Image (tube, coloured by chain):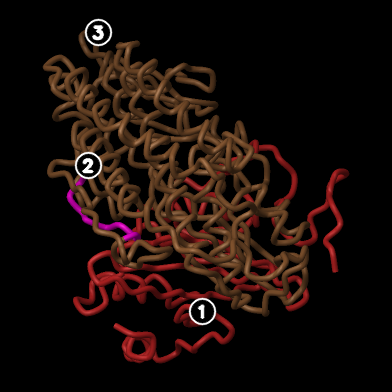
Chain colours: A red, B brown
Amino acid sequence: MDALNLIAAVQALQPDAKVREQTDQPTLIVPAHALVALARQLRDDPTLRFDLLETHTAVDWLDEDRFELLYLLASVPLGHHLTLSVSIDRDEPVVPTLCEVYPIAQWLEREVYDMFGILYDNHPDLRRLFLEDDWVGFPLRKDYEDDFMLERPE
Amino acid sequence: MSVHVSTLQARISGESTASSPLSTEEYFVNMGPQHPSTHGVLRLVLRLDGETVREVVPVLGYIHRGIEKMGEHGNYRQFVHLVDRMDYLSALANNWAVTMVVEKAAKMETTERIQAIRTLVCELQRIQSHLLWWGVFGMDLGGFTPFFYGLREREQICDIFEKTIGARLTMNYIQPGGVMFDIHPEFVKDVKAFISYLKPKLVEYDALVTDNVIIQERIRGIGKLSAERAIALGATGPVLRASGVAHDLRKSEPYGVYSQLDFDVPVGKDGDCWDRYWVRMEEMRQSVRMIEQLIDNIPEGKTFMVKPAAKIKVPAGVHYSHLETARGILGVLLVSDGKEAPYRIHCRTPNFNNLWCIGEMATGGRMGDLVAMLSSIDIVVPDIDR
């Protein structure tokens, strides 16, 4: 399915989904509360069949005071791709977990918790993945600081 | 709304499960981080009931270097160096994955020659990676001979790389806009000599290991992974293909010059350790086929379209591209705000996703088979931790 048809098909399932600009793959902005239901529909719909959660990560938009969560979905049998983008408040970073739809999300979400401190509601085993349990702070946040940090070139 | 965050200590402590003097008791055992069969610093905490594995809890982070954070503080060309250190057996494919997303985002052009050289060296490195895996797999099963054989052949590929690239492991060869150097004048001759040397060796490997009854009895029927579970657990590469899913980006979304090459995608049937073994052995033969088609047909042309500049301007936005390394899909997600350094760069590494299949494979199986299963996934720990 090409990008335009794909976006139309997903918007038929979730009318609140808006197209995210400045991306090279079809990307839709989805409200956090609709994420799990939509992902399940995307996986089970016979014309979409997004069965692979290729990766999941977050972007810290410090200036806009929000985290953007990106879910990169792919369909192994049909070969198309779709990205879901969920924006959440930086002060209360809670989002429902996708573990029940995509089991791999359990570990991808643990990495995002470890690096960004995003809390996944209903996650069966939410804890740090790479860092120690008593590590202070979340390193991939833009306001994280330690003594050895490099300057970002302008 | 409150979300509960757990700790490793809480995860692996439990009440005694023995309910009567006759029942067995479960206990936790550490495997790694310093264990010869975990190939690096992977730690697995196993919940065992006698010899039976009840649960596998991987504990990561022993070689976490924060490559993604470092990437935010350097320019795109510097990031190519860092990804060499992820999956060091597929350094060229890692370089290419970053190069691909930068070239796509910044709309840089390449020549046919560049694409052909990239494809050629990546297929050579795929053979090199599978040779090392084959040797180590034999050693994990208790046979030392394959390790020497595998490394002997692999050494020749490293020598070929050394002549052209100047490095044997961390290549930093494929760069946005081209490749660092043109191929060495003896490259074509060396590769041809190596291919004609390797082909009878692969037959010898079959006689030594593949057709060996002891090996077959050892790895058939253990560590089964169904196609549905493999996809749900995010497995890609030979692990997914061994479960019967013919998903290979070289076929389904061809990059480089793969669309001009004639090759097959080997798939397994049962998804057990044997199928994963067989798929990799067959992939080596397919890579030999591809190299044979390419080696006499490298087009003439430049190896850099324009003089490489240190700074690359990537337009603001989210860019993603992926390719097939020896272990599966490596994707690079690039979020740019238009500056010299990426705003956020994330690598979807094949080993990270493949590792979690070990829980599915090993649960209910024997402790002794776990080593064979782990080896059949072919993990490289720095690629998991990044």
Q: Taking B221 as reference, is B2 above or below it?
A: below
Same chain for marks 3 and 1?
no
The label number, if any, that marks residue B128 in the structure image: none
Q: Earlier in the sequence, mark 3 or mark 2?
A: 3
Q: How many marks?
A: 3
Q: Nearer the viewer, residue A106 or B264?
A: B264
**Is disc 2 surrounded by few (<14), some (14 to 19) or many (20+) residues within 10 Å?**
many
Q: Nearer the viewer, mark 3 or mark 2?
A: 2
Residue mark closest to the camera, 2 vs 1: 1
For label 3, the residue is B21
Q: What SS does tag 3 mark?
A: loop
What is the three-letter code of the residue carrying label 3? Pro
Pointer 1 residue: A24
The span from disc 3 to disc 2 (Cα, nearest Å) is 36 Å
Q: Nearer the viewer, mark 3 or mark 1?
A: 1
Tell me the subunit letter for badge 3.
B
Indicate left or right for B62 with A15 as reference.
Answer: right
The reply to whether dot 2 and dot 1 touch (C-beta < 8 Å) is no
- Magenta-highlighted residues: B243-250
What residue do we see at 20% from left, 51% from top? B227
- The chain to which mark 2 is attached is B
Task: From the image, tell me which residue sits under label 2.
Answer: B225
Q: Are marks 3 and 2 in contact (CB under 8 Å)?
A: no
Look at label 1 and name its amino acid.
Asp
Q: Secondary structure at mark 1?
A: loop
